Amino acid sequence: MDISIVIPLFNEEESLPELCSWIEKVMLSNNYSYEVLLIDDGSKDKSWSVIEELSSKNKSIKGIKFRRNYGKSAALNIGFQKVTGDVVITMDADLQDSPDEIPELYNKIIKEKYNMRSLIKWSPISEFHDVTNQLSNLMNFGQRPYLNDESEVNDDLDWTPAVNVTENDSRYKIDLEVPGVKKEDIQVGVENGKITITGERKSEKEVKNDKIHRTEFSVGKFSRSFKVPQDAESTDIVAKFENGILGVSLPKVESSKPRKVQIEVS
């Protein structure tokens, strides 16, 4: 296959038909074999119904649906795992990126051997984040690794609890905010160098006579995973649940703790 086009989207029911028709016209006029992956990032409108209809009419259009909003990066990541084309192009669904530019980009990559993989709309905010992340990596160079968040996108999960990760001289600490979750519905485990916290917040018993006007409480299953640092003692982890906060403490190995040495000045 020549081209895979990955399009993350959120509430884009109105623009999808025009965008897909535009892409199809460009692909057919240039005789490209192609696929379009539409990643519905938890849309609240009729985007998924539109995707299903478009896919039924054009087998080159495929859809992936998230049960909730995970963000553009997660949507792109899933799309990149599924693509089969020689060239992968990303586009926004809001018609700001022109499919007419695809042939020129494809020729640059295939014929002129440009080191490019995607058509990405420039964003000063994203560029700022890239710079700050690079500076952060430079500042942390040579320091001990911290608890990296390695939670994966899982469509079977219903919500994601907030977390604080801290460190002092003797231990790492994870504080997970899980109000309304019972202690017996939480599991903490360590496997393959990763600590995983899973659980479920169950809904209250339904009162049939109540009329629901609005509900924003998240219920259902959750999961958060973190890479255990090399200087942490993974066999001596302590977990404590109190006032809706799950605290997980990972002590550091003795050799990694900083030592104070008093030097006499002569």
Image (tube, rainbow, N blue to C red):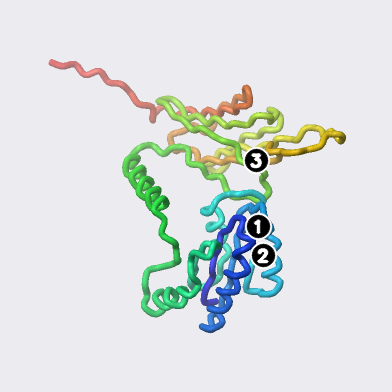
State the residue at coordinates (32%, 40%).
Answer: 139
Cα gap from disc 3 to disc 1, whole angstroms? 18 Å
**Quarter of the rendering containing residue 50:** bottom right
Query: Which residue in the structure is indicated by mark 2?
Result: 51
What x and y, as percent, mark residue 36? 58, 69
Which residue position holds label 1?
A: 65
> Quarter of the image holding residue 265?
top left
| Residue 251 x, y percent position in the rendering | 48, 27
Q: Position of residue 122 (x, y in %)?
A: 41, 59
Q: Quadrant of the N terminus?
A: bottom right
- How busy is the neighbourhood of tag 2: few (under 14 within 10 Å), some, or many (20 plus)? many
In-front residue for pair 12/126: 12
Amino acid carrying label 1: it is: Lys
Q: Nearer the viewer, residue 140 or 126?
A: 126
> Height in image: 153 above or below 19?
above
Reading the image, the residue beneath label 3 is 222
- In the rendered structure, the answer to whether residue 127 lies left or right of residue 79 reads left
Q: In which quadrant is the C terminus drawn?
A: top left
Q: Answer few, some or many: residues within 10 Å of disc 1's Cα (few below 14, many 20 plus, some between 14 and 19).
A: some
SS class, disc 2 = helix
Instruction: Indicate the amino acid at tag 2.
Output: Ile
